[in-house]
């Protein structure tokens, strides 16, 4: 499997990249981002662009890929709907439209979040924009499209959030997260499970495009790495 990955420097993207590199069935990963990742691996190749939504001029490099994983995202805090939509909707659609033309056989996975509003009419700004993005991506001529809607995500295997506040919160709330995982395991997932679940939907596509936390955990159990905790 050959995978194109966006957002590999973020918390979710780091976890997805790690699982792609660990998986023996993944032969190549092309990480597209605005800055170098600072890591090397025989499977990993990078395409550093000032605007990841503008893939023009890279058509030949983006032909024939099996999977596209969109893990790039920003917080809506402090942003107007226009600002948030520009990064969340416009950027995603620009890149995804190019990919669908270059690799129509690709399975595209878009990470949104629990609470995403597919009606695009709710009161939550971020949920409306995420829902609009899901709907627009779903109309593109990919082989298959899935929307991942995780809730609480635990960072594991050395993955760290780039946001200082998130890192502090994870440290302070870690005992509570362990309790939540023990009492209600399907109320949260982890960065490695998200990565394994993405690979699973490419190999064995589920019937439902919307993949929530429970489904992510179930799919992740189908794609395990020897010596890795579930």
Image (cartoon, rainbow, N blue to C red):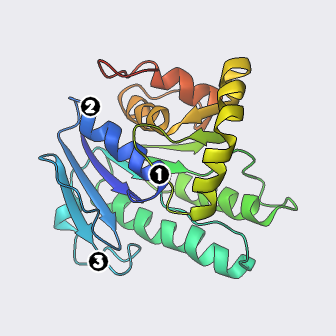
Of labels 1 and 2, earlier in sequence is: 2
Task: Name above or below for residue 29 compared with residue 165.
Answer: above
Q: Nearer the viewer, mark 1 or mark 2?
A: 1
Q: Residue furthest right?
A: 123
Q: Mark 1 or mark 3: which comes first in sequence?
A: 3
Residue 121 appears in which quarter of the rendering? bottom right
Point out the residue furthest to the left here: 42
| Alpha-carbon span between mark 1 and mark 2 | 21 Å
Count of number-bearing discs:
3
Q: Residues within 10 Å of mark 1 (few under 14, many from 20)?
A: many
Q: Do the residues labelled 1 and 2 touch (CB within 8 Å)?
A: no
- x%, y% of residue 25? 22, 30
Front position among marks 3 and 2: 2
Contact (CB < 8 A) between labels 1 and 3? no
Asked whether the residues under the numbered discs 3 and 2 touch, taking CB atoms below 8 Å apart as contact, a structural biologist would say: no
SS type, badge 3:
loop
In this view, the residue in front, 31 or 85, is 31
Rounded to the nearest angstrom, the CA distance separating label 3 from label 2 is 30 Å
Quarter holding residue 178:
top right
Secondary structure beneath dot 1 equals: loop
Residue 9, image x and y in percent?
39, 60
Q: Mark 1 points at which residue?
A: 160
Residue at point 26%, 34% (across, down): 22
> Can residue 45 be seen?
yes
User: Whole-Å distance between the Cαs marked 1 and 3?
Assistant: 31 Å
Disc 2 packing (10 Å; few <14; some 14–19; many ≥20): some
Is residue 219 or residue 163 the one in the foreground?
163
Label number found at residue 23: 2
Q: Name the element at disc 2.
A: loop
Mark sitting on residue 56: 3
């Amino acid at each position: 499997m050959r995978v194109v990955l966006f957002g590999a420097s973020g918390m979710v993207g780091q976890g997805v990249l790690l699982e792609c590199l660990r998986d023996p069935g993944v032969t190549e990963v092309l990480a597209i981002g605005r800055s170098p990742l600072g890591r090397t691996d025989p499977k990993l190749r990078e395409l550093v662009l000032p605007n990841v939504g503008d893939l023009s001029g890279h058509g030949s490099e983006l032909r024939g890929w099996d999977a596209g994983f969109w893990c790039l995202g920003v917080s809506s805090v402090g942003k107007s709907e226009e600002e948030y939509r520009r990064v969340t909707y416009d950027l995603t659609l620009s890149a995804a439209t190019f990919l669908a033309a270059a690799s129509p056989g690709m399975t595209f996975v878009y990470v949104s979040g629990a609470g995403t509003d597919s009606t695009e009419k709710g009161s939550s700004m971020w949920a409306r924009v995420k829902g609009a993005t899901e709907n627009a991506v779903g109309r593109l001529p990919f082989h298959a499209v899935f929307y991942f809607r995780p809730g609480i995500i635990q960072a594991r295997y050395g993955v760290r959030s780039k946001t200082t506040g998130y890192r502090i919160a994870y440290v302070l709330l870690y005992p509570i997260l362990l309790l939540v995982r023990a009492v209600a395991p399907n109320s949260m997932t982890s960065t490695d499970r998200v990565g394994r679940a993405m690979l699973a939907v490419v190999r064995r596509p589920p019937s439902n495009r919307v993949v929530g936390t429970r489904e992510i955990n179930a799919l992740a159990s189908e794609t395990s790495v020897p010596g890795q905790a579930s």
